[in-house]
Image: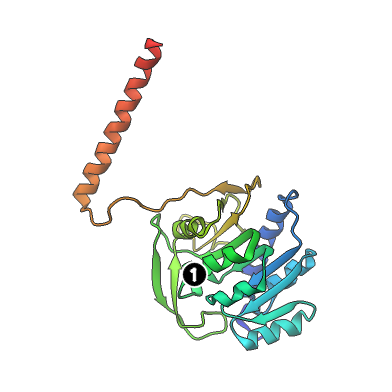
Amino acid sequence: MSSWPFDHPAARRLTAARQAFLRRLLAQLPDRPLRTALDAGCGVGYFSGFLRELGLEVVAFDGRPDTVAEAQRRFPEINFRVADVESPGIRDFGRFDLVLCMGLLYHTENPFLVVRNMHALARSLLVIETMCIPGRAPVLLLRDEVTSVDQGLRRVALYPTEAVVVAMLYRAGFPHVYRSADPPEHPDFRPGLFRRRKRTIVVASQAPLSAASLRRAPDLLWSVDTWLTFNQRLRLAAGQAAQGVRRLRRIPARRAEG
């Protein structure tokens, strides 16, 4: 068996599920011609080779020279580079019709900088797949990571909620952000009775998308004062609910007057 963690059976099953999702998604976008692609955090090149098979001209990079060397050995026809996704220098790679950021964002120390870099690189479409912590709040969880070729470069990382990924994408400059209504067929993406969702895929675009498997993602960045006490939040929620009831009660009266 290969010593690369990307080749282990569990990792291969996850990769296959994500690739099947991407194939379905791209098939739903016939009006968005994609010729070039960037694979950010490419590992040993599974997604780079997949994009190449789809007929795209691919550039890929990873932060570890030994991983890039292995990817180049497996896929000699692809342009692989050594680069840090948190470095603004990757913007010199140019702009690409499609940017993939698969399993990378949550391994980084500065995920918002990564999102801004991805925005600068994506001419049309960005697909981010990431571990996500439970919760509706737009927050990040600081975690230590082990030293491994499939982990981050700095041994510290910020794990996001889905809401904060969406909020960062909007604020980086993407006008259209979507969640998947048909996530990959893998337990990490599909919660169950005794299982919470661990991963999400978020798609950002420079133009509106009409794919059946996508749903517009609302910007849920909180505007409520974080320092409110629990009782103050309850009173605020009650007041907002009362205002909504009053507005509803006025609607019939206005129609009758008309």
The quarter of the image holding the N terminus is bottom right
Residue placed most toward the observer, 75 or 78: 78
Asked whether, in this view, residue 110 is left or right of residue 95, the answer is left
The quarter of the image holding the C terminus is top left
Q: Position of residue 64 (x, y in %)?
A: 60, 85
Q: Position of residue 232 (x, y in %)?
A: 20, 48
Asked whether, in this view, residue 226 is left or right of residue 32, the answer is left
Q: Is residue 45 above or below residue 148?
A: above
Q: Does residue 252 appear anywhere in the picture?
A: yes
**The quadrant where residue 137 appears:** bottom left
Residue placed most toward the observer, 28 or 253: 253
Q: Which residue is mark 1?
A: 113
Q: Position of residue 230 (x, y in %)?
A: 22, 52
Tell me the residue at 24%/48% (across/down).
Answer: 233
**Element type where label 1 sits in the image:** helix
Q: Residue furthest top?
A: 257
Tell me the residue at 47%/67% (across/down).
Answer: 112
Q: Amino acid at mark 1?
A: Leu
Q: Residue furthest bottom?
A: 66
Decide: few, some or many residues near mark 1? Use Cα within 10 Å; few <14, some 14-19, many ≥20.
Answer: some
